[in-house]
Image (cartoon, helix red, strand yellow):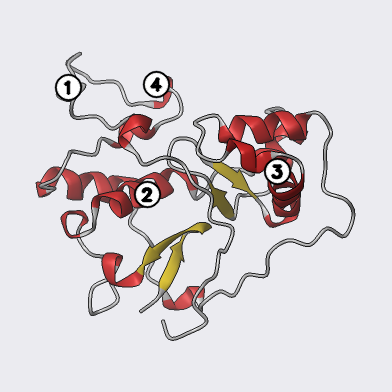
């Protein structure tokens, strides 16, 4: 087995870590912590718009934005892009100082500032050639509710609260009794994650799944 992307290109997982022998997703308590954190976060990101499109069209014309297909960076500080805007990111990262922000929590913010200032990749600037395995052969990742149910059913590591991944506290569901069972120690923060890194190799298996 090699590495595979789930939902979005960019973050890659060891197939043997997240799939069982039958090709189905393993329970979260069988997946290494870093991979399970990324998998949970992906469930929030897979239907989000491209950041560059969002900057172009804003909230009022968000319907014009492309859905993101690529994720760079690390959980809670990630950058989402569509195929059309990947070349802009790569130019910024390779040629215009973007790599200096690798590992920073504000990595995505620095690209947003660059793009909002009308910077773009030169016409014809090459992106990356992606070699995808057959996406139809991969099982669909579990949805947010299913992931939360798996967590509550007996995840033996640190508890993952899906609400802690929401970009805004207003998106979190209200507790009808006004209480919150999760303590500060239970919740993940960006400081719990490894230093951010960007993998520009994005090589995907051409093989056998």
- Badge 2 local density, few (<14 within 10 Å), some, or many (20+)? some
* First along the sequence among labels 3 and 1: 3
Which residue in the protein does label 1 denote?
A: 183
- Badge 1 local density, few (<14 within 10 Å), some, or many (20+)? few
Q: Are marks 3 and 2 in contact (CB under 8 Å)?
A: no
Q: Nearer the viewer, residue 39 or 136?
A: 39
Q: Nearer the viewer, mark 1 or mark 4?
A: 1
Disc ID at residue 169: 4
Q: Are marks 3 and 1 in contact (CB under 8 Å)?
A: no
Q: Are marks 4 and 2 in contact (CB under 8 Å)?
A: no
Q: Position of residue 114 (x, y in %)?
A: 74, 32
- Disc 4 on helix, strand or loop? helix
- Badge 3 local density, few (<14 within 10 Å), some, or many (20+)? many
Q: Are marks 1 and 4 in contact (CB under 8 Å)?
A: no
Residue 125, placed above or below residue 17: above
* First along the sequence among labels 3 and 2: 2
Q: CA distance from mark 1 to mark 4?
A: 16 Å
């Amino acid at each position: 087995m090699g590495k595979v992307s789930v939902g979005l290109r960019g973050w890659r997982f060891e197939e043997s870590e997240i799939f069982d022998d039958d090709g189905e997703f393993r329970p979260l308590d069988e997946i290494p912590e870093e991979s399970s954190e990324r998998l949970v976060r992906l469930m929030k990101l897979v239907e989000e718009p491209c950041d560059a499109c969002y900057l172009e069209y804003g909230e009022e014309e968000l319907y014009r934005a492309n859905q993101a297909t690529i994720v760079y960076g690390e959980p809670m500080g990630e950058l989402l892009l569509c195929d059309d805007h990947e070349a802009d990111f790569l130019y910024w990262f390779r040629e215009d100082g973007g790599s200096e922000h690798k590992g920073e929590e504000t990595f995505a913010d620095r690209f947003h500032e660059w793009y909002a200032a009308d910077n773009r990749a030169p016409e014809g600037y090459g992106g990356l050639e992606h070699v995808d395995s057959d996406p139809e052969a991969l099982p669909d990742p579990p949805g947010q509710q299913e992931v939360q149910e798996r967590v509550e059913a007996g995840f033996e590591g640190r508890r993952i609260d899906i609400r802690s991944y929401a970009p805004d506290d207003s998106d979190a569901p209200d507790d009808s009794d006004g209480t919150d069972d999760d303590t500060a120690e239970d919740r993940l923060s960006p400081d719990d994650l490894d230093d951010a890194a960007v993998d520009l190799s994005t090589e995907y298996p051409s093989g056998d799944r």
